Every structure is written in structure tokens, then in C-alpha cells.
Image (tube, rainbow, N blue to C red):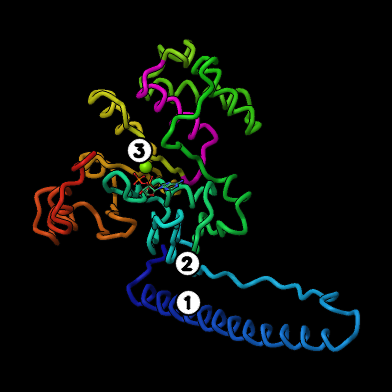
Amino acid sequence: MVMRNTNDDEKMQNLIDEFKKDISSKNNEILGYHDKIDALEQEIIRLQKLIPGETSKLKVKREKPEDIFDPDGASAVIVKDLVKQFGDVTAVNGINLDIKKGELFGLLGPNGAGKTTTINMLVGLLDPTEGTASVGGYDVKRDLNKIKEIIGVCPQEPAVFKFLKGRENVELFGNLFEMDKNVLKERADKFFEASGLKEASNRKAKGYSGGMLRQLNLIIALINDPKIIFLDEPTVGMDPRVRRKTWTFIGDLKQKDKTIILTTHYIEEAEALCDRVGIIDYGELIALGSPKELMKKHDAKNLEEVFMKITGRRILEGV
Ligand SMILES: Nc1ncnc2c1ncn2[C@@H]1O[C@H](COP(=O)(O)OP(=O)(O)O)[C@@H](O)[C@H]1O
Ligand SMILES: [Mg+2]
């Protein structure tokens, strides 16, 4: 039997640290070349201008090195200095986040805080005004198609075909993903059962309540078994009983290699579900940590009190 002792662990850790340092210095080296390439590009343009009729015929082709850097590949989502402006309105004002694989992460904040705008930039529905983000290691500005293959999205506004039955909606999306028929049926059955929407699944979505539409959207977002799941206010419009059932449903999705990012303005939802919470207000991240850590740090009974102590307002004020 091979026994690993602490000495071995330490050696291994040192080795990993060395590798990380090495990667980091090589990355800096690349950035140095980048400056040289810039200078060469300028020089080419200058020379081209000296040749009559030759202006910018020779385009300089190059790709910037990854701005985002995740040496150990442990992150599902990295957000760097993300900004979104709509005219004069700064909806997201320089957010930084590092969400680890396997985390159930919540963006908690009042209405208008910038939660949906943040999510929409991560799933490719909006272009960032400034900053960068990567999802599953892919850059949102460059590799959106790759990102779309690995994510599931439940948008804030339910997007289903009302003239189709619940089950037909799920099958339609499953077929778009070219899923195997048996796998599709099995997974749909499982999700309809677990979400409590089984009985309604053979009725047209036209007659569904807001909460039911959201449950259906949740199933659609999950049908392709995505690695990274974005849920924007997943339980709005649900009555308390269905909301609790949905919390269990979402909680049960948690697996080592699945990452779930949800937004909510319900304090209890963030407390019940999330490993870590980022509290967002006026487009800025004002607190980050596990619900327990945040309560301890701010000497608060719950996350509402945490928000209150930081901002002097209640989360639900004015909603
Ligand atoms: N398309 C848009 N055009 C102009 N302003 C917008 C747009 N989308 C969102 N906003 C504004 O950006 C801010 C953040 O909105 P949003 O991200 O939807 O907040 P949340 O999801 O936290 O409720 C709000 O002030 C909202 O009015
Ligand atoms: Mg929103």
C-alpha cells in the first residue's frame, strides 16, 4: 500500500506553486511581445504610407493573448472590471467576480441593481461597454459560440411557446440540441416530476401561471445537461409552496462539475440555496462571501440586515 505523507503533499504543492509562477511569468512575457508587436504594426503602417498606392494593403493580423487568466482551471466564470452603460445610465459599474466550478452562486440585490444586465453580458445577450468576462474558460467577446454550447439559461422573462404543451416545449428545445430521443424523454420525465409540473406538462403553456411558466423555462434551460447554468430570478411569481419545491429542485442540481449562477432579490432564496452570494447595488458589488461569512462579518441575523448595515436601506424597499 502506498502511503502519502505530508512531506509528499508539501512537495507536490511546492511544485504546483512553481508551475503557476512559471505560467504567470510566461504570460507576462507574452504581454511584453504584445507591446513589440504594437510598435512593429505602427512601423508597418508608417512604411506603407511612404509607398504610393500601397496604403493599408498589408493588414497586420494578430490576436491578443487571453486577457483572462485562470492558471488552475478551477473557475467557471471570471468577470473583470465589467461595465455596462445604457446612455447615461451605468447599469453595471466595474464588477469583478471569480465563480468556482461546482459553486451555487447568487447575485442578490434590489430591483434595478444590475443583476440581469450582468447575466446578459455573460450569456452573450449584451455586449460589455468595458471590461472582460470568461465563461467556462471562453472569452465572452470572442468565443460566444463555444459558450452557448456549455451553458443553460433561464431568462428573467419566460420564453416559451404558449401554443405548445409544456412537454412539447421541452422536446422542441431538446431536438434543437439534437439530443437522443430516449435521453430527452428520460430527463424531461425526471425534471417534470421533480419540479412538480408533471400534471400540467400535457397542457398548453397558454394556460400556465407566471410561476408555472418559470418552472417550464427552468426545465428547458436544463434539458441539455449544461455545465454552467444561469437562472435569472428563477422563482418570481411562484407561491411560497412552489418556491420551496423549486429551491429543492435547484439545490438537487448541485454536482461537482456543475456551476449554477442565479440572481434573486429574495433574501431567503440566497440564504437557502447559495454557497456564496455577491450583493449588488447600483451596479456595484458591495459584499461577497458565504451567507454565514457575511452575517458574521457584519454582525447580522440575516442577509437583509447585512444589506441594511452596508446601505442603510432594505433590499425590498421600493420594489
Ligand atoms: N436596455 C436598457 N436600456 C436602458 N436602461 C436599462 C436597460 N436595461 C436595464 N437598464 C437599467 O439598468 C439598471 C439595471 O437593470 P437590471 O440589470 O435589469 O437590474 P436588476 O436585474 O438587478 O433588477 C436599471 O436602472 C435599468 O433601468
Ligand atoms: Mg433583473
Q: Image height check: is 316 above or below 240?
A: below
User: Main SS of the magenta segment?
Assistant: helix
In terms of depth relative to the viewer, which is nearer, 185 or 170? Answer: 170
Q: Is residue 305 magenta?
A: no
Residue in view at x 20 percent, y 39 percent = 268
**Helix, strand or loop at disc 2?**
loop
Image disc number at residue 224 = none
* Label 2 beta carbon within 8 A of ligand 1: no
The x, y position of residue 231, in whole percent, is 41, 40
- Is 45 situated above or below 220? below
Q: How crowded is mark 3: few (under 14 residues within 10 Å), some or many (20 or more)?
A: many
Q: Earlier in the sequence, mark 2 or mark 3?
A: 2
Eyeballing the image, is 2 above or below 99?
below
**In the rendered structure, does residue 221 fall within the stretch colored magenta?**
yes
95 horizontally vs 166: left or right: left
Query: Considering the numbered disc 3 on the image, is that residue within a helix, a strand or a loop?
Result: loop
Residue 20: mark? 1
Q: Residue furthest right?
A: 53
What amino acid type should be assigned to the residue bearing mark 1?
Lys
Judging by the rendered image, the residue that carries numbered circle 3 is: 233
Residue at 32% across / 38% down in the picture? 251
Q: Give the range drawn in magenta.
A: 208-228
Residue at image mark 2: 72
Amino acid under disc 3 = Glu
**Does the CB distance between marks 2 and 3 fall below 8 Å?**
no
Specify the quadrant of the image occupied by residue 83: bottom left
| Among numbered discs 3 and 1, the one appearing first in the sequence | 1
Image quarter (top left, top right, bottom left or bottom right) of the C terminus = top left
Tell me, yes or no, whether the two marked residues, 1 and 2, touch with CB atoms within 8 Å.
yes
> Please, what secondary structure does the residue beneath circle 1 have?
helix
**Residue 219 relative to residue 303: left or right:** right
